Amino acid sequence: MERPGKNKIDQIYKSMVIMALVIALLIITKDIVVPISFAALFSVVLLPLVKRLEKKTGRIVSITLVLLGSFLVVGLFSWFIVSQLTNLVSSLPGLEEKFFQYISFVRTSLHDQLNISIEEQGQLLKEGAKNLSAYATDLLFSTSYLLYFFIQVPIYIFLFLLYRDRFKEFLLALRPDSTLQWKDEIQRMVRSYISGLSLVVFIAGALNSIGLLILGIDHAIFFGFLSGMLTMIPYVGITIGATLPTLLALVTKDSAWSAVGVIGVHAFVQFLEGNFITPKITGSRISVNALAAIIALLIAGKIWGIAGMILAVPAVGILKIILSYSKELRPLVILIGDEKPSEPEIISPPAEEIKTENPPS
Protein backbone atom coordinates (compact mmCIF):
# COMPACT_ATOMS: atom_id res chain seq x y z
CA MET A 1 0.00 0.00 0.00
CA GLU A 2 1.38 3.42 -0.99
CA ARG A 3 1.73 6.05 1.66
CA PRO A 4 -0.61 9.11 1.47
CA GLY A 5 2.39 11.45 1.62
CA LYS A 6 3.93 9.87 -1.46
CA ASN A 7 0.67 10.23 -3.39
CA LYS A 8 0.54 13.91 -2.47
CA ILE A 9 4.14 14.44 -3.64
CA ASP A 10 3.30 12.71 -6.92
CA GLN A 11 0.29 14.99 -7.41
CA ILE A 12 2.40 18.10 -6.74
CA TYR A 13 5.09 16.86 -9.15
CA LYS A 14 2.53 16.18 -11.89
CA SER A 15 0.93 19.61 -11.35
CA MET A 16 4.32 21.33 -11.66
CA VAL A 17 5.12 19.42 -14.86
CA ILE A 18 1.73 20.35 -16.35
CA MET A 19 2.23 24.00 -15.35
CA ALA A 20 5.70 24.06 -16.93
CA LEU A 21 4.33 22.54 -20.15
CA VAL A 22 1.49 25.10 -20.25
CA ILE A 23 3.92 28.02 -19.79
CA ALA A 24 6.22 26.64 -22.49
CA LEU A 25 3.24 26.23 -24.82
CA LEU A 26 2.12 29.81 -24.15
CA ILE A 27 5.59 31.12 -25.01
CA ILE A 28 5.86 29.06 -28.21
CA THR A 29 2.35 29.97 -29.41
CA LYS A 30 2.51 33.64 -28.37
CA ASP A 31 1.86 35.00 -31.88
CA ILE A 32 -1.31 32.92 -32.10
CA VAL A 33 -2.70 33.03 -28.57
CA VAL A 34 -2.28 36.77 -27.86
CA PRO A 35 -4.60 37.96 -30.69
CA ILE A 36 -7.11 35.26 -29.73
CA SER A 37 -7.05 36.41 -26.09
CA PHE A 38 -7.67 40.07 -27.00
CA ALA A 39 -10.38 39.03 -29.46
CA ALA A 40 -12.12 36.99 -26.76
CA LEU A 41 -12.17 39.99 -24.39
CA PHE A 42 -13.49 42.38 -27.05
CA SER A 43 -16.09 39.82 -28.15
CA VAL A 44 -17.49 39.74 -24.62
CA VAL A 45 -17.71 43.55 -24.60
CA LEU A 46 -19.42 43.76 -28.02
CA LEU A 47 -21.81 40.85 -27.43
CA PRO A 48 -24.70 42.86 -25.84
CA LEU A 49 -24.74 45.32 -28.76
CA VAL A 50 -24.63 42.46 -31.29
CA LYS A 51 -27.56 40.74 -29.55
CA ARG A 52 -29.60 43.95 -29.62
CA LEU A 53 -29.05 44.50 -33.37
CA GLU A 54 -29.40 40.81 -34.14
CA LYS A 55 -33.15 40.88 -33.45
CA LYS A 56 -33.66 43.32 -36.34
CA THR A 57 -30.93 42.53 -38.87
CA GLY A 58 -29.72 38.97 -38.33
CA ARG A 59 -26.50 37.68 -36.82
CA ILE A 60 -24.00 38.23 -39.65
CA VAL A 61 -25.25 41.73 -40.49
CA SER A 62 -25.31 42.79 -36.82
CA ILE A 63 -21.75 41.56 -36.24
CA THR A 64 -20.59 43.36 -39.40
CA LEU A 65 -22.24 46.64 -38.36
CA VAL A 66 -20.76 46.49 -34.86
CA LEU A 67 -17.28 45.79 -36.22
CA LEU A 68 -17.57 48.67 -38.71
CA GLY A 69 -18.62 50.99 -35.89
CA SER A 70 -15.63 49.80 -33.85
CA PHE A 71 -13.33 50.43 -36.82
CA LEU A 72 -14.69 53.97 -37.06
CA VAL A 73 -13.91 54.67 -33.39
CA VAL A 74 -10.43 53.16 -33.71
CA GLY A 75 -9.88 55.11 -36.93
CA LEU A 76 -10.75 58.43 -35.28
CA PHE A 77 -8.45 57.67 -32.39
CA SER A 78 -5.66 56.68 -34.80
CA TRP A 79 -6.17 59.92 -36.73
CA PHE A 80 -5.71 61.87 -33.49
CA ILE A 81 -2.49 59.97 -32.69
CA VAL A 82 -1.10 60.44 -36.22
CA SER A 83 -1.88 64.17 -36.23
CA GLN A 84 -0.12 64.61 -32.89
CA LEU A 85 2.86 62.58 -34.09
CA THR A 86 3.05 64.74 -37.23
CA ASN A 87 3.27 67.88 -35.09
CA LEU A 88 5.94 66.21 -32.96
CA VAL A 89 8.02 65.16 -35.97
CA SER A 90 7.80 68.67 -37.49
CA SER A 91 9.48 70.06 -34.37
CA LEU A 92 12.30 67.50 -34.32
CA PRO A 93 14.95 69.71 -36.03
CA GLY A 94 14.68 72.32 -33.29
CA LEU A 95 14.56 69.64 -30.60
CA GLU A 96 17.65 67.97 -32.06
CA GLU A 97 19.72 71.15 -31.70
CA LYS A 98 18.56 71.67 -28.13
CA PHE A 99 19.20 68.01 -27.38
CA PHE A 100 22.84 68.24 -28.47
CA GLN A 101 23.27 71.43 -26.45
CA TYR A 102 21.93 69.61 -23.41
CA ILE A 103 24.23 66.63 -24.06
CA SER A 104 27.21 68.98 -24.31
CA PHE A 105 26.24 70.58 -21.00
CA VAL A 106 25.91 67.17 -19.33
CA ARG A 107 29.28 65.98 -20.67
CA THR A 108 31.00 69.12 -19.39
CA SER A 109 29.36 68.72 -15.98
CA LEU A 110 30.40 65.06 -15.75
CA HIS A 111 33.99 65.98 -16.63
CA ASP A 112 34.24 68.90 -14.22
CA GLN A 113 32.30 67.55 -11.22
CA LEU A 114 32.69 63.74 -11.41
CA ASN A 115 36.06 63.66 -13.22
CA ILE A 116 34.78 61.34 -15.97
CA SER A 117 36.91 61.82 -19.07
CA ILE A 118 35.49 62.52 -22.51
CA GLU A 119 36.90 59.16 -23.72
CA GLU A 120 35.07 57.26 -20.98
CA GLN A 121 31.86 59.10 -21.78
CA GLY A 122 32.29 58.19 -25.46
CA GLN A 123 32.67 54.53 -24.55
CA LEU A 124 29.49 54.68 -22.49
CA LEU A 125 27.67 56.30 -25.41
CA LYS A 126 28.85 53.53 -27.76
CA GLU A 127 27.51 50.86 -25.41
CA GLY A 128 24.26 52.78 -25.12
CA ALA A 129 24.02 53.01 -28.92
CA LYS A 130 24.42 49.22 -29.20
CA ASN A 131 21.59 48.66 -26.72
CA LEU A 132 19.47 51.26 -28.53
CA SER A 133 19.98 49.52 -31.88
CA ALA A 134 18.87 46.24 -30.31
CA TYR A 135 15.75 47.92 -28.92
CA ALA A 136 15.11 49.53 -32.34
CA THR A 137 15.22 46.08 -33.98
CA ASP A 138 12.73 44.77 -31.43
CA LEU A 139 10.53 47.80 -32.06
CA LEU A 140 10.59 47.18 -35.82
CA PHE A 141 9.58 43.58 -35.23
CA SER A 142 6.86 44.72 -32.85
CA THR A 143 5.52 47.14 -35.48
CA SER A 144 5.22 44.39 -38.09
CA TYR A 145 3.58 42.17 -35.50
CA LEU A 146 1.18 45.01 -34.66
CA LEU A 147 -0.08 45.03 -38.27
CA TYR A 148 -0.60 41.28 -38.07
CA PHE A 149 -2.39 41.78 -34.75
CA PHE A 150 -4.87 44.34 -36.13
CA ILE A 151 -5.66 42.07 -39.07
CA GLN A 152 -6.20 38.93 -37.00
CA VAL A 153 -8.19 40.32 -34.05
CA PRO A 154 -11.27 41.49 -36.07
CA ILE A 155 -11.41 38.10 -37.82
CA TYR A 156 -11.37 36.27 -34.48
CA ILE A 157 -13.99 38.63 -33.03
CA PHE A 158 -16.29 37.97 -35.98
CA LEU A 159 -15.90 34.19 -35.63
CA PHE A 160 -16.30 34.23 -31.83
CA LEU A 161 -19.57 36.16 -32.10
CA LEU A 162 -20.79 34.06 -35.03
CA TYR A 163 -20.18 30.68 -33.37
CA ARG A 164 -20.90 31.68 -29.77
CA ASP A 165 -23.74 29.14 -29.45
CA ARG A 166 -21.34 26.32 -30.27
CA PHE A 167 -19.06 27.34 -27.40
CA LYS A 168 -22.03 27.27 -25.01
CA GLU A 169 -23.13 23.84 -26.26
CA PHE A 170 -19.55 22.59 -25.88
CA LEU A 171 -19.41 23.70 -22.23
CA LEU A 172 -22.79 22.13 -21.52
CA ALA A 173 -21.64 18.89 -23.13
CA LEU A 174 -18.64 18.79 -20.79
CA ARG A 175 -20.80 19.44 -17.71
CA PRO A 176 -24.45 18.65 -18.48
CA ASP A 177 -25.50 19.46 -14.91
CA SER A 178 -23.79 22.89 -14.98
CA THR A 179 -25.80 26.13 -15.09
CA LEU A 180 -22.78 28.04 -16.51
CA GLN A 181 -23.22 30.66 -13.83
CA TRP A 182 -19.46 31.23 -13.80
CA LYS A 183 -19.62 32.11 -17.53
CA ASP A 184 -22.14 34.89 -16.90
CA GLU A 185 -20.06 36.17 -13.99
CA ILE A 186 -16.91 36.26 -16.13
CA GLN A 187 -18.76 38.16 -18.87
CA ARG A 188 -20.01 40.76 -16.39
CA MET A 189 -16.53 41.15 -14.94
CA VAL A 190 -14.85 41.56 -18.34
CA ARG A 191 -17.40 44.14 -19.56
CA SER A 192 -17.09 46.12 -16.35
CA TYR A 193 -13.30 46.00 -16.52
CA ILE A 194 -12.97 47.03 -20.19
CA SER A 195 -15.56 49.81 -20.05
CA GLY A 196 -14.21 51.08 -16.73
CA LEU A 197 -10.61 50.92 -17.97
CA SER A 198 -11.50 52.93 -21.08
CA LEU A 199 -13.05 55.66 -18.93
CA VAL A 200 -10.05 55.61 -16.57
CA VAL A 201 -7.67 56.01 -19.55
CA PHE A 202 -9.66 59.01 -20.81
CA ILE A 203 -9.79 60.71 -17.38
CA ALA A 204 -6.10 60.07 -16.68
CA GLY A 205 -5.16 61.35 -20.15
CA ALA A 206 -7.24 64.51 -19.69
CA LEU A 207 -5.72 65.22 -16.24
CA ASN A 208 -2.17 64.62 -17.49
CA SER A 209 -2.79 66.88 -20.50
CA ILE A 210 -4.15 69.69 -18.32
CA GLY A 211 -1.13 69.45 -16.00
CA LEU A 212 1.36 69.47 -18.88
CA LEU A 213 -0.44 72.40 -20.54
CA ILE A 214 -0.18 74.40 -17.30
CA LEU A 215 3.56 73.66 -17.19
CA GLY A 216 3.90 74.77 -20.83
CA ILE A 217 5.24 71.42 -22.11
CA ASP A 218 5.20 71.04 -25.90
CA HIS A 219 2.76 68.48 -27.33
CA ALA A 220 1.07 68.25 -23.95
CA ILE A 221 -2.12 66.60 -25.27
CA PHE A 222 -0.21 63.85 -27.06
CA PHE A 223 1.99 63.01 -24.08
CA GLY A 224 -0.91 63.34 -21.66
CA PHE A 225 -3.11 60.82 -23.45
CA LEU A 226 -0.11 58.57 -24.16
CA SER A 227 0.46 58.40 -20.40
CA GLY A 228 -3.26 57.78 -19.93
CA MET A 229 -3.15 54.83 -22.35
CA LEU A 230 -0.15 53.38 -20.55
CA THR A 231 -2.16 53.22 -17.32
CA MET A 232 -3.54 50.00 -18.84
CA ILE A 233 -0.27 48.49 -17.60
CA PRO A 234 -0.72 48.70 -13.79
CA TYR A 235 2.17 49.96 -11.61
CA VAL A 236 4.54 50.20 -14.62
CA GLY A 237 2.78 52.19 -17.33
CA ILE A 238 2.74 55.51 -15.46
CA THR A 239 6.55 55.40 -15.10
CA ILE A 240 7.00 54.82 -18.83
CA GLY A 241 4.45 57.52 -19.65
CA ALA A 242 6.24 60.11 -17.50
CA THR A 243 9.69 59.47 -19.00
CA LEU A 244 9.21 61.06 -22.44
CA PRO A 245 7.67 64.38 -21.33
CA THR A 246 10.26 64.60 -18.55
CA LEU A 247 13.10 64.26 -21.07
CA LEU A 248 11.37 66.78 -23.34
CA ALA A 249 11.12 69.25 -20.44
CA LEU A 250 14.84 68.82 -19.68
CA VAL A 251 15.73 69.55 -23.31
CA THR A 252 13.31 72.38 -24.08
CA LYS A 253 13.08 74.23 -20.76
CA ASP A 254 15.75 76.36 -19.14
CA SER A 255 15.02 75.15 -15.63
CA ALA A 256 15.10 71.59 -14.35
CA TRP A 257 12.07 72.44 -12.22
CA SER A 258 9.89 71.92 -15.29
CA ALA A 259 10.98 68.28 -15.39
CA VAL A 260 10.28 68.01 -11.67
CA GLY A 261 6.85 69.49 -12.34
CA VAL A 262 6.16 66.85 -15.02
CA ILE A 263 7.06 64.10 -12.57
CA GLY A 264 4.86 65.75 -9.94
CA VAL A 265 1.88 65.91 -12.32
CA HIS A 266 2.16 62.23 -13.20
CA ALA A 267 2.65 61.25 -9.56
CA PHE A 268 -0.45 63.23 -8.54
CA VAL A 269 -2.56 61.74 -11.37
CA GLN A 270 -1.30 58.27 -10.47
CA PHE A 271 -2.34 58.87 -6.85
CA LEU A 272 -5.82 59.96 -7.93
CA GLU A 273 -6.13 57.09 -10.41
CA GLY A 274 -5.03 54.40 -7.98
CA ASN A 275 -6.94 55.59 -4.92
CA PHE A 276 -10.09 57.27 -6.24
CA ILE A 277 -10.70 57.03 -10.01
CA THR A 278 -10.15 53.31 -10.65
CA PRO A 279 -11.86 52.04 -7.45
CA LYS A 280 -14.93 54.23 -8.10
CA ILE A 281 -15.26 53.45 -11.81
CA THR A 282 -14.27 49.79 -12.14
CA GLY A 283 -15.73 48.94 -8.74
CA SER A 284 -15.01 45.56 -7.18
CA ARG A 285 -15.62 43.38 -10.24
CA ILE A 286 -12.07 42.04 -10.22
CA SER A 287 -10.95 42.73 -6.63
CA VAL A 288 -7.40 41.43 -7.07
CA ASN A 289 -4.93 42.43 -4.38
CA ALA A 290 -1.68 44.24 -5.21
CA LEU A 291 0.59 41.24 -4.51
CA ALA A 292 -1.34 38.95 -6.88
CA ALA A 293 -1.47 41.71 -9.53
CA ILE A 294 2.29 42.39 -9.38
CA ILE A 295 3.18 38.69 -9.55
CA ALA A 296 0.78 38.25 -12.47
CA LEU A 297 2.34 41.27 -14.24
CA LEU A 298 5.86 39.89 -13.83
CA ILE A 299 4.95 36.38 -15.00
CA ALA A 300 2.74 37.54 -17.90
CA GLY A 301 5.33 40.14 -18.93
CA LYS A 302 8.01 37.46 -19.01
CA ILE A 303 5.81 35.17 -21.12
CA TRP A 304 4.04 37.62 -23.47
CA GLY A 305 5.76 40.99 -22.99
CA ILE A 306 3.65 44.16 -22.95
CA ALA A 307 0.59 42.30 -24.24
CA GLY A 308 0.86 39.92 -21.32
CA MET A 309 1.06 42.80 -18.84
CA ILE A 310 -2.15 44.28 -20.28
CA LEU A 311 -3.93 40.92 -20.08
CA ALA A 312 -2.55 39.98 -16.66
CA VAL A 313 -5.13 41.66 -14.40
CA PRO A 314 -8.29 40.50 -16.24
CA ALA A 315 -6.74 37.02 -16.53
CA VAL A 316 -6.27 36.86 -12.77
CA GLY A 317 -9.84 38.10 -12.31
CA ILE A 318 -11.13 35.30 -14.56
CA LEU A 319 -8.96 32.77 -12.72
CA LYS A 320 -10.36 33.98 -9.41
CA ILE A 321 -13.96 33.42 -10.57
CA ILE A 322 -13.15 29.92 -11.87
CA LEU A 323 -11.37 28.99 -8.64
CA SER A 324 -14.36 30.16 -6.58
CA TYR A 325 -16.47 27.38 -8.21
CA SER A 326 -14.00 24.63 -7.23
CA LYS A 327 -14.24 23.13 -3.75
CA GLU A 328 -10.61 21.98 -3.74
CA LEU A 329 -9.08 25.21 -5.11
CA ARG A 330 -11.43 27.74 -3.50
CA PRO A 331 -8.93 28.61 -0.70
CA LEU A 332 -6.64 30.15 -3.37
CA VAL A 333 -9.27 32.89 -3.83
CA ILE A 334 -8.28 34.15 -0.38
CA LEU A 335 -4.70 34.73 -1.62
CA ILE A 336 -5.76 36.38 -4.88
CA GLY A 337 -8.74 38.45 -3.77
CA ASP A 338 -8.81 41.95 -2.34
CA GLU A 339 -11.83 41.50 -0.10
CA LYS A 340 -11.45 42.03 3.61
CA PRO A 341 -10.98 38.71 5.40
CA SER A 342 -14.12 37.70 7.23
CA GLU A 343 -13.84 37.76 10.98
CA PRO A 344 -14.62 34.53 12.80
CA GLU A 345 -18.03 34.50 14.34
CA ILE A 346 -18.13 34.63 18.12
CA ILE A 347 -20.61 32.01 19.26
CA SER A 348 -22.17 32.88 22.58
CA PRO A 349 -22.72 30.03 25.02
CA PRO A 350 -26.28 29.03 25.85
CA ALA A 351 -28.12 31.21 28.30
CA GLU A 352 -28.26 28.36 30.82
CA GLU A 353 -24.46 28.23 31.01
CA ILE A 354 -23.99 31.93 31.65
CA LYS A 355 -26.91 32.20 34.06
CA THR A 356 -25.65 32.49 37.62
CA GLU A 357 -27.58 32.21 40.80
CA ASN A 358 -27.96 35.25 42.98
CA PRO A 359 -25.46 35.12 45.82
CA PRO A 360 -26.99 34.66 49.26
CA SER A 361 -27.57 37.86 51.12
Image (cartoon, rainbow, N blue to C red):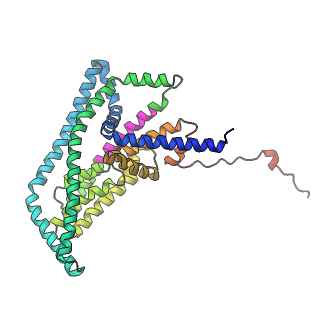
Q: Nearer the viewer, residue 190 or 306?
A: 306
**204 lies left or right of 355:** left
Q: Is residue 185 magenta?
A: yes
| Residue at 46% across, 40% down | 319
**228 lies left or right of 291:** left
Residue 285 in view, yes or no: no
Percent across and percent down for residue 171 are 46, 25
Percent across and percent down for residue 224 are 24, 53
Q: Nearer the viewer, residue 225 or 292?
A: 292
Residue 274 in view, yes or no: yes
Q: Is residue 339 magenta?
A: no
Up the image or down, 157 lies above or below 28; here it is above
| Residue at 48% across, 42% down | 17
**142 lies left or right of 336:** left
Residue that protrudes farthest toward the right in the picture: 360
Q: Which residues are magenta?
A: 184-201
Q: Which image quarter: residue 109?
A: bottom left
Percent across and percent down for residue 107 are 18, 74
Up the image or down, 55 lies above or below 130; here it is above
* Magenta-colored segment: predominant secondary structure: helix
Percent across and percent down for residue 326 are 55, 36
